[in-house]
Image: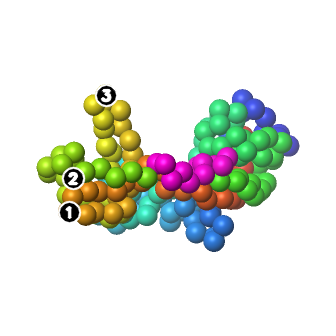
Amino acid sequence: MALAEKGNMVTINFTGTLEDGTVFDSTLEGFGCDDEDCCEDGCEDGECDDGGCGCGGHESGPMTFVLGEEILFPQIDAAIVGMAPGEKKTVKIAAADAFGEYDKDKVFTVPRSDLPEDLIPEVGDELSLSNEDDEELEVVVLEVKDDQVTFDANHPLAGENVSFDIELVSIQ
């Protein structure tokens, strides 16, 4: 039986969970955006912007990639090397090596007068802000006041230790 090696095209199923058991991503059926009712406004042509539906922003189904290109995390690639089709493993990744530690310096407040007039932010909104150089920054609205808005530019999973249950489906 062939074992996975770097450079092989592999197909895997995975489920990513937080320490409390919350599933944040999965290739398994029922998690992705392949259901017509998944996102009322977020899914078009099989793509999803996760318009609040929790569908993870992708269709469910096994993921195929070249092993060694670190499409997910290097720890996952390393775990798959030497696996046989049908084999399963769990990989635990510390926050610093996953989505990074939570950085309080990435939380900032902007005067409302500096924001576009047509922007009506609400707590929890995920926005893309741009500066004078047209550099984009993905943020979440933390607080809205009459004269200012507080944003968080940390990855939504920053500070979280994560686990991935992986199954090697096939080696092409």
User: Which residue corresponds to mark 1?
Assistant: 146
Q: Are marks 2 and 1 in contact (CB under 8 Å)?
A: yes
Answer yes or no: is residue 155 visible. Answer: no
Query: Residue at the location (72% across, 50% down)?
Result: 168
Local SS, label 1:
loop
Secondary element at image label 3: loop
Q: Amino acid at mark 2?
A: Arg
> Is 58 or 93 nearer to us in this picture?
93
Disc 3 vs disc 1: which is toward the camera? 1
Determine the CA span between mark 2 and mark 1. Answer: 7 Å
* Vertical comparison of 146 with 99: above or below: below
On screen, residue 157 versus residue 43, left or right, reads: right
Of the two numbered discs 3 and 2 in the rendering, the one whose residue sits closer to the viewer: 2
The circle on residue 112 is 2
Which stretch appears magenta?
Answer: 96-106
| The image quarter in which residue 165 lies | bottom right
Q: Amino acid at mark 3?
A: Asp
Which amino acid type is shown beneath numbered disc 1? Asp
Contact (Cβ within 8 Å) of mark 3 with mark 1? no
Q: Which residue is mark 3?
A: 133
- Classify 84 as above or below 134: below
Please tell me the numbered disc located at residue 129.
none
136 and 53: which one is in front? 136
Q: CA distance from mark 3 to mark 1?
A: 27 Å
Residue 157 on image: x %, y %: 54, 56
* C-alpha separation, residue under disc 3 versus residue under disc 2: 20 Å
Label 1 Cα crowd, 10 Å radius (few <14 / some 14-19 / many 20+):
few
- At x 31%, y 43%, the residue is 129
